[in-house]
Image: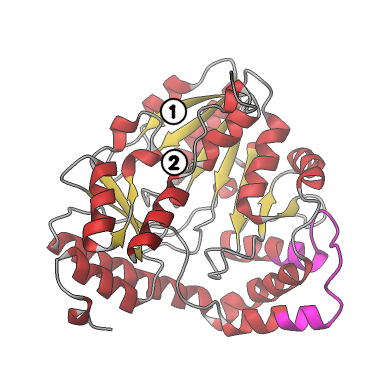
Amino acid sequence: MNGPLRPSLQSLGTSVFTRLTQLANQHGAINLAQGFPDFDPPATLLDAADDAMRHQFNQYAPSPGLPALRTAIAEHSRRRYGVDYDPDTEVTVTVGATEGIWAAVTALISPGDEAIVVEPFYETYPAVVAAAGGVVRYVPTTFPDFRLDLDRLAAAFTSRTRLVFLNSPNNPGGALLTAEEFAAVAALADRYDAYLLCDETYEHLVYDAAAHLRASAVPGCRDRTMVVSSASKTFSVTGWRVGWVLAPPPLTDAVRRVHQFITFAAPTPLQQAVATALSTGADSGYFGALRAEYTERRDVLIDYLDRAGLPAARPAGAFFVMARCPDDDERWVTELIRGAGVAAIPGSAFYHDRSGGRDLVRFAFCKQLSTLHAAGARLMGKEDTDATD
């Protein structure tokens, strides 16, 4: 007898993140598996949330989001990327980027429609397409640079293509898409009457000489593009669940029709606090300091991985490092947790065809330097006491 879960969702098992976090907790492992910081958000952000809760921001917000936050998001896009959005008709606040993705996909995908997902991918993408009754066509990229192969992408388009997922900076590979790549995808989308869903959650986490490019800033992209982002990674508040979707009015209307019946509105006081943080971040130097701090964390982790004999890619963005492992990834990660006391994610979790990542593992570096040093010491078979702050 089949269980209650409908057939199109039978492939959805327990998230690998949930399973490995439980195993890490059982063994007292340092958690470099999940992408959440182990340090506090900016004090000014916490103060703003406290102030909001004490000054009447405790009831439902308008479903599209507080006007102050929608205005701050639009102004941030204009000031930082040169892309104008009308806060009233083109900005929607959601319960994290993930709800924005679910609302967008639910609004656009009908049973049998196809969505293109670039591998390696954030695990929500194929799950939400399956929930909508759609079909995913995968376009693989490869270690270490994870560059998009435009010929492979073009071959994935069909008459049923409705949506293309683009994630830049990419989780887990760390690649950034270029203007030429965005333009090529937009041209294909225009030819096949498809839309782009661009996940820019890690927009402020780019390194070296790299710069984040907003997809809708590229000529030919804006009219077919939904940009999704979030406060979670930028302000180290993954538990707040405040995200947003930027899109032209017809797409915004579609997203809002679904959003109002998923969650109605994101938490009101947290919206107000994020509005304050976005409005002051550039002037305070916060975004530049964030980039510098994460660059140091990335370099520390890569150094330890190299010294431990795990060749690592050097991500241009996000806060994950993909590295080669000497064995089957799931078996190796399990033994790493049990033996060395460090948790990572098997690379195959980010591929539809698991063989694509069987020799890869993902480590998160959104941690205090002391945590990274302690994890590095364990990776090299030393005691934590050998690590330095």
Vertically, is 298 above or below 147?
Answer: below
Residue 48 position within the rendered picture, expressed as x and y whole percent measured from the top left: 70, 81
Residue pointed to by mark 2: 121
Residue placed under numbered mark 1 in the picture: 138
Examine the rendering and report whether any part of residue 208 can be seen.
no
Query: Which structural element holds mark 1?
Result: strand
In the rendered view, does 368 fall on the left or right side of 86?
A: left
Please, is residue 302 above or below residue 345 in the view?
below
Magenta stretch in the rendered image: 50-72
Quarter that holds the N terminus: top right
Q: Secondary structure at mark 2?
A: loop
The amino acid pointed to by label 1 is: Tyr
Location of the C terminus (image quadrant): bottom left
Asked whether the residues under the numbered discs 2 and 1 touch, taking CB atoms below 8 Å apart as contact, a structural biologist would say yes
> Dot 2, how many residues are within 10 Å of its Cα: few (below 14), some (14-19), or many (20+)?
many
Q: Quadrant of residue 225?
A: top right
213 displayed left or right of 225? left
Task: Residue 349: give x, y in percent of width and height.
Answer: 38, 40
The residue lying at 29 percent from left, 43 percent from top is: 330
User: Is residue 75 shown above or below 137?
Assistant: below
| Tag 2: amino acid | Phe
Residue sitting at x 62%, y 21%: 113
Q: Is residue 55 magenta?
A: yes
| Residue at 86% from the left image edge and 62% from the top image edge | 60
- Examine the rendering and report whether any part of residue 386 can be seen: yes
